[in-house]
Amino acid sequence: MKKKTPPALRAALFLFVLTTVCTFFLAGGNALYEGELAKRDESLRKEIVRAFGGSFTDDTFGAVFDRTVERKEFPSEKATVYLFKGAPRQAAVRMRGPGLWNEIDLLVFFDLDSNSIKSVRVIFQAETAGLGSRIEEPGFLNQFRNISIDRPLRIVRQRTGAPDEVDAITGATSSSQAVGAIVNRAAALAARGEEGR
Amino acid sequence: MRNTVPLFKRKWFTIFLDGLWDNNAIFGMVLGMCSSLAVTTTAINASVMALSVTAVLVISSFLLSCIRKFIPDQVRMVVFMLVISTFVITVDFVLRITVPDISRALGPYVGLIITNCILMGRAEAFAIKNPPLLSIMDALGSGLGYGGVIILIAVAREFLSTGSFFGAMLIPGWPAWGLAAIAPGAFFVLAGFTMLFNWVRGRLKNKTS
């Protein structure tokens, strides 16, 4: 007579098989995701090397990056500082900070010889559509160019002509100020990153 | 011989319609409230969430229905959770790769699809007892019912708070009603639509009876 498998053993076996299948399925998904993350990180590093004035091909990029750029992580600041090893002294800081609804992720380039901001790019933002989301517009971001980082810049509702002022977006003062705060923190971090060299 | 049963009386269609309208997850059963309030700040975010929930619901219902005869009764809830969470994590990977900005804007709510009562509810109430094709129709009806409602709420909230539709500005200079963009505003919009839905449903029921 055929012996019947005890229900508890059958349940355990079923769960073991299902868990194994799910684990392998997710491991495959995770491998694909990790590959994609690596590609994205490389694309950002290429943008930084280009901004520093470096030239490379796909084959030489790894070597050019290692030779010309020093990378420093600041996990507590949610930031990464990229310092150019050559001249003129330059830095790029990728930093996340609080926005109105979600974190804002910025990439800020600095000229450390003239102690000024070269450019600001928004990597991610989820500010209010039509209002705060305008922080990505060149009209707002171009105002940061050439501002000195000797002292913190100010986001103002109406400019008085002072060189450290950035005009806030009408109706989106909070989002504008959030960007200003991140840029100021990034500037301080760029200087800190330089100190250890 | 040709099937002469009208479309609206066919079993698969009535099952689909039940989830979509009669037993709508949000308006009818008041399930999935958390995400329907949290991700409806913009119509694009809500659309991605709607698609994600529908995809996980259809795939997990289909799979659970296929293996329903092998699932030991005493561990069925664990099996539901295992299958649902596997597909939710997969959808999360897909979103992070294909639409990273929206994925970040949705924050933890994609992962929290695992705890969405609609998924466990449909698995326990329907997929475990019915064949795969009917389970797909049930999941599709429930998923689209949930998705349609959150998109509707998001369109209203986005328009009221910014005057835009799917990110495109419709009325420049719109007097932004900031409350609609935050949680209390979401409660007002949801309550308004629930009232309207139940009023329309009541009228339709009275007409047909």
Image (cartoon, coloured by chain):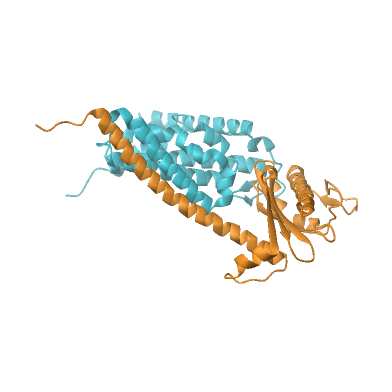
Determine whether, in the image, residue A172 is placed left or right of residue A23: right
Q: Position of residue A187 (x, y in %)?
A: 78, 51
Which chain is the one coloured orange?
Answer: A
Q: Position of residue A139 (x, y in %)?
A: 76, 57
Quick check: can you spot residue B75? Answer: yes
- In the displayed orientation, state which residue is furthest to the left: A1
Q: Position of residue B203 (x, y in %)?
A: 44, 30
- In the displayed orientation, state which residue is furthest to the front: A197
Of the 4 image quadrants, the one containing the C terminus of chain A is bottom right
Which chain is the one coloured cyan?
Answer: B
Residue B189 position by quadrant: top right
Q: Position of residue B146 (x, y in %)?
A: 46, 38
Q: Is residue B143 above or below residue A80?
A: above
Q: Residue at x 60, y 61 (%)?
A: A43
Determine whether, in the image, residue A155 is placed left or right of residue B132: right
Residue A59 position by quadrant: bottom right
- Residue placed most toward the observer, A30 or B190: A30
- Residue placed most toward the observer, B139 or A180: A180
Q: Residue at x 70, y 65 (%)?
A: A68
Of the 4 image quadrants, the one containing the N terminus of chain A is top left
- Count all numbered tags in the image, as a single digit: 0
- Residue placed most toward the observer, A104 or A159: A104
- Residue placed most toward the observer, B162 or B55: B55
Q: Is residue A92 above or below residue B129?
A: below
Quick check: can you spot residue A128? Answer: no
